[in-house]
Image (spheres, coloured by chain):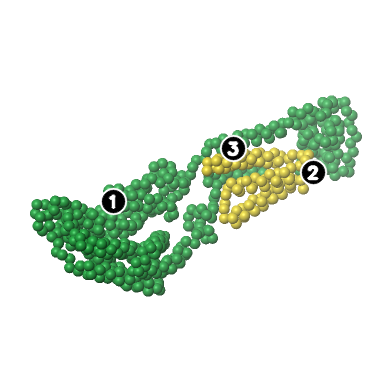
Amino acid sequence: MRPRASHIILVAAVVLVIAILGIHATAPILYSAENISTDAHADPSTIKKRSPGDAAAVIPLMDELLGETGTLALTIKLKDYENAERDLARYTDLSGRFDRLVITLDASDTDIGEFQQKNRANLDSLATLLDDSRRLDDLKRLEIEVRGDEGQHTAIIYEGEALRQKMRQSFSSYQERETAVTRIAGNYNLDTTPYQESIEDFAEVADAADDWRKKVGGNTPPSPLSITLSPTGGSYGDTIRISGRYTGTPPDTPAEVYVDSRLARSPVFDESGHYTCTYRIGRISAGPHIVYATAGPAYSDVRTFTVFPGNTTLTLALAGVNRTTVACTGTLTTGNRSVANAPIALRVDTTMLVTAETDGNGTYEKEITLPAGEHTIRAEFHGAGFPLNLSESETGTFHVPDDLPSPLPLIAGIAALLGTGWYLRRRQETPDEAPPETPPKPPEEEIESPAIDITGLPPRDAATVLFHLLRARLGLSETKTPRDCAKVAHARFFERYERIRYAGEVPTEEELRWMEDIVRGEDAHAA
Amino acid sequence: MSGGKKYYAAAVLAIWLIIITFFMILNRTLDLEVFFVLSLIGLLVVAVLIDGAFSRPRYMRYISYLIAAGVALFAYIVVEKILEIIAT
């Protein structure tokens, strides 16, 4: 009964183990340090030293960014535009790295996040300063070339005036950020000297534009074309009404309204010489922008409007398209307005970035094919080129089920199992199929009973003597084992002897007498 | 001695499995496929060492069935790996 119970326990344990292994058969890697599923299973030695490393890199990077402002402003002031381009590219690269770092460390709501916004604005200001400074040099050269041509000279003076005002506005914005940037830099013991110097250099460049403007024509001739903006400031989606009047007979051609020196609208004059158009604030950076109008040779005064940055809200909804593809949809809004044609970055598992773009309704949609496993997806809007602050959606999760095993290896496995079974079976059957080595056994009666003397021998040795005698009596070869002999005759005798010989069992006196009887041929039922 | 041979074999096999597990943990990877293949190798070695020349105990027949199943599963893993390599 006890062996039976132990067998049942053994079978149950085997079945349990096989069931547990079967559950993991499709994903045999139970644990891998590099492929951790949860933070609880994280192996500290294999986790990328991202957080401490990144955190340690933030402060030096902030220091570098402040240093770059000084270098860039100086090269612009020296009109070394080639080096300035190189410095700007480096500054842009560093700013990009810093932006990613802030997002990685989730430090958007800290003073580091504030520093990031100010730095981004500084980058825009210095990039604009470089363009404006180049344009001012071009205007200076053109002004000399067109002296004598009143029409073109006036156009250049107006362009110069527009540029001067723009540079002045840009400098004001740059200077306004000094307090905040210096305060944050002070919190981290950063050297702000290069940044302070950049403000001075910026001021010198803006002053140079003022000086040139005074030199070439401080008194702008009164223009017959007027311009009015209403309102003079707004956020994304707001509309600026631009209107004016041409005193006298307006030209036949429509007026041209320029925003930041780019043609934005071409309104037509009415009978009384009035023109009106609207400008919707869209993909344009936050801050001051310059507007002026032209009508033939006449240029209006230069006006400015300010674009205020707005906060955004980004949503994300995940829906499975099929087993491996997920559809990511959502909307980007600022206030109650949707943001059109805005780039959206979908961050999958905090590493992979997939880009999408909002349509006219502020809705985006992107289908992403993912490998098997649990995936997190988050939508991000970085606000580049828009007067909008960056925003992130809630993080969604999507589970891609494991692939079902291919039937081909299953079939191959079954075939291999059957093949192995067939081979083993054939191997076992081969000795039986072979022709018998000895002639058919003669009848027992024809062989004389051998003399038996097992007196005084130990029981197991006595059993061995009886085995040898019976094997000899049956005429079997001495190479035959008890199992071989059991196939010929007296199976019970030979199986019992096998257990005595190989399992170490000791025969009883009664068993020895029974075996002796068989050897003598007296047990008629033994065979 | 002959009767205890199978128990020695079972003990050696258990020690081998523990050694495999120990080194897999040391390597920070628990892969059932690797574990299975190394276990099968251990079983094959033990089966060869305990197999006698003139007799074939019953437990050897059972071990041969186990080896047959293991070899079939091993063939399945090999075919699957080959298909993976071909697919990439």
Secondary structure of the residue carrying numbered label 3: helix
Q: In the figure, the green chain has which letter?
A: A
Q: In the figure, the yellow chain has which letter?
A: B
Mark 3, other Cα within 10 Å: few <14 / some 14–19 / many ≥20: many
Q: Which mark is residue A487?
A: none
Mark 2, other Cα within 10 Å: few <14 / some 14–19 / many ≥20: some
Cα–Cα span, label 1 and label 3: 57 Å
Q: Which residue is mark 3?
A: A413
| Depth order, front residue of A46/A130 | A130
Q: Amino acid at mark 2?
A: Val
Q: Which residue is mark 2?
A: A506
Q: Amino acid at mark 3?
A: Gly
At 66% from the left edge and 41% from the top edge, which residue is drawn?
B67
Residue A16 % position (x, y): 57, 45
Q: Is residue A162 visible?
A: no
At 34% from the left edge and 63% from the top edge, which residue is drawn?
A123
Cα–Cα span, label 3 and label 2: 46 Å
Mark 1, other Cα within 10 Å: few <14 / some 14–19 / many ≥20: many
Q: Earlier in the sequence, mark 3 or mark 2?
A: 3
